Image: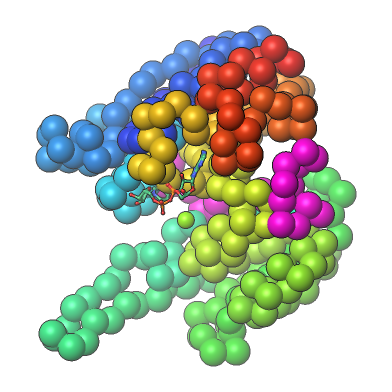
Amino acid sequence: MTHEIVVIPGDGIGQEVTPAAVEVLEATDVDLEFVEAEAGDAVQEATGEALPQETYDLAAEAEATLFGAVGETAADVILPLRDAVDSFVNVRPAKAYPGVDAVRPETDMVFLRENTEGVYAGHEDRLTDDVSTLTRVVTESASRELAEFACEYVAGDDHDGVTIAHKANVMRETDGLFRDTVVDVADDNGVETDEVLMDAFATRVCLDPTQFDVVVCPNLAGDVLSDLAAGLVGGLGLLPSANIGHERALFEPVHGSAPDIAGEGISNPAATIISAAMLLEYLGYDDQAAAIHTAVEETLEDGPRTPDLGGDAATEDVTEAVIDRL
Ligand code: NAI
Ligand code: MG
């Protein structure tokens, strides 16, 4: 069976790391057909539109999309794209790898981030010169969907339960609803939960990340706390993510277009290659996905490494090394 994969490299290092991940996918025996589409600052400049309708439609119809990164147009591109794939959860594993100089080498956790609402629902207003407001949206249905996904996620593997990171002591209605719903669904599914206030989480995860395994959070908390975890494991070049929807999904590194190093060919392709492995897992090719994970792990341990990890290798060298190990 041939799977059609939409590939959106985007801007900056998206143009380097996305082709790298496609090369790795092509080196597997999975039958994939790639359809390239445009989005980001460059298309905006050329056409006035950061996310052409054609790109949106392709992502909305394909089984899976691989996205690199865009620049200043990120909010105009990635939020609608998550909507195009009808994504209700953003899966963000944060794991330290042997051989990588990490602040907390014992880190190994995954964030399951609500992906549609919270403060990113887009209800912001400028009322007067002095006053701006933001409406935070939390629904029982979206919280339930995330919680159901979390229960399935922990059932498949060796997990003790889920940690809910929230701030329901202050945001009683919104995070209260989120917390109560996740606890209810988990109880119904026989999944254990514990809770931590999101600010306390930030401290505790730095001091001892081994306390956490599967972390369920509202949208903004998941965004910020997973970037924090990226800092613990050796940088943004290592964090993959999956936006899972009901019938399709979009895979992307957590990082952005990195204008400070774009065009130099030295960006770390690991996050995007691991995102590609998650794409294969999503399509049901667990063995091929595992092979990519292992090849990336071995490459991170033995080199070559890009400058963000203290090495002097190019994106291409790392990509080739991963393919050689497949
Ligand atoms: P960034 O993730 O692009 O870069 C932060 C730092 O990490 C930079 O020093 C960069 O060189 C480094 N870095 C990131 N990925 C790397 C990789 N693969 N290899 C080596 N080093 C890497 O975040 P920043 O600087 O806050 O934003 C830059 C642009 O990216 C902005 O225009 C922002 O809007 C956009 N952005 C887009 C996102 C997306 O498309 N999903 C997500 C985050 C930011
Ligand atoms: Mg972010």
Q: Where is residue 120 drawn, in percent x and y?
A: 39, 64
Q: Does the stretch in magenta take in 265?
A: no
Q: Quadrant of the N terminus?
A: top right
**Nearest to the observer: residue 195 or residue 231:** 231
Residues drawn in magenta = 82-106
Between 309 and 81, the residue placed more toward the observer is 309
For residue 101, side relative to residue 276 (left or right): right
Q: Nearer the viewer, residue 304 or 253?
A: 304
- Split into 4 quadrants, where in the image is the C terminus? top right
Task: Judge from the rendering whether residue 167 lies leftward or rightward of residue 262; answer left or right.
Answer: right
Residue 30, by quadrant, is top right
Q: Against 245, is 29 above or below?
A: above
Q: Is residue 266 above or below residue 49?
A: above
Residue beneath the point at 59% across and 49% down: 235
The reply to whether residue 95 is in sight is no
Residue 131 appears at what percent x and percent y?
21, 87
* Scheme of image coloration: rainbow
Q: Residue at x 56, y 58 (%)?
A: 227
Residue 321 in sight here = yes
* x and y percentages locating residue 45 in the rendered image: 15, 38
Residue shown at 14% from the left, 86% from the top: 128
**Please, is residue 79 above or below residue 126 in the view?**
above
Q: Is residue 210 left or right of residue 41?
A: right
Is residue 95 highlighted in magenta? yes
Q: Please state the total of marks drawn on the protein image.
A: 0
Query: Measuring 53% from the left and 24% from the top, which residue is drawn there?
Result: 314
